[in-house]
Image: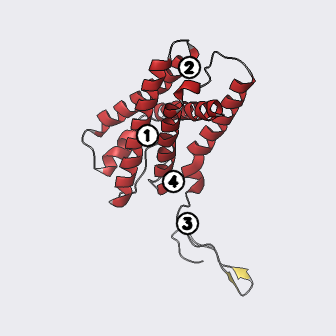
Amino acid sequence: MSGLLSSVATYTVLFTLLVSTAEHLSRPAALAEALAAHRVLPAPVTVAVLAIASEGLLAGAGLAALLYDGGEGLLIAVLVGSGALLGLYAGYGRHLMSTGRTGSCGCSRVELPMTGWVVARASILAGLALVALALSGSIIPLNRADAALAVVLLASATFTALLWHLPAAMYEPATATAARPTNGRSVGMTEGGIPG
């Protein structure tokens, strides 16, 4: 059982870092623009490049460690680095929310504000990295092609998709008030937001 738990935790963290890297590379300026708008960190472009490079290196090194025999030491280093990076993300997001800076999170190519769900996702992933680290001796490697690996990969892909889309799924943008019926008729809104 610990092998299944540690493996799903590990692959979910690595897959999420891989998805995050791909999202950032599809719109490279999004993170730097968000960091600049937050006005918390100096040199937002440099910080953005370092964050994206760190995510990509951690994901790539982790998958390589799982693919080749003797990669246990590298995998442990990747899990420590991933836990630290994701913990920093959670702390940064929490700081932004506590200071009222809820602009774009910059975490994907889609414009999403910094919400508690972004912080929750980073916290959950940091926790998964710690679980994987604690049970690192029982992680199923990629070079072991069997039913257990298939289950782990399927579960990890599912959890990655759910966690990645969590902030967008839970975000409820402020919308104009819906047209309310008046005497059996609905009142529409004109372009300027005036009932018409």
Say which amino acid is labelled 2. Leu
43, 68: nearer the viewer = 68
Label 2, on which residue? 66
Tell me the distance, in whole angstroms, between the alpha carbons under discs 4 and 2.
30 Å
Disc 2, SS: helix
Task: State if disc 2 and disc 4 touch (CB < 8 Å).
Answer: no
Q: CA distance from mark 3 to mark 2?
A: 46 Å
Residue 143 in view here: yes
* Residue 92 horizontal/vertical position (percent): 36, 48
The amino acid on which the numbered mark 4 sits, given as a three-letter code, is: Trp
Identify the disc placed on residue 117.
4
Can you say which quadrant of the picture contains the N terminus? top right
> Disc 3 marks which residue?
175
* Quarter holding residue 6: top right
Which amino acid type is shown beneath numbered disc 3?
Answer: Thr
Viewer-side residue, 47 vs 134? 134
Query: Disc 3 or 1, which lies upstream in sequence?
Result: 1
Left or right: 21 in relation to 100? right
Using the image, determine if residue 102 lies above or below residue 4: below
Q: Which residue is mark 1?
A: 86
Residue 26 visible to an observer of this rendering = no
> Can you give x and y, in whole percent of width and height, for residue 122 in the image?
47, 45
Q: Are marks 3 and 2 in contact (CB under 8 Å)?
A: no
Residue at 32%, 60% (x, y): give it: 99
Q: Residue at x 49, y 26 (%)?
A: 59
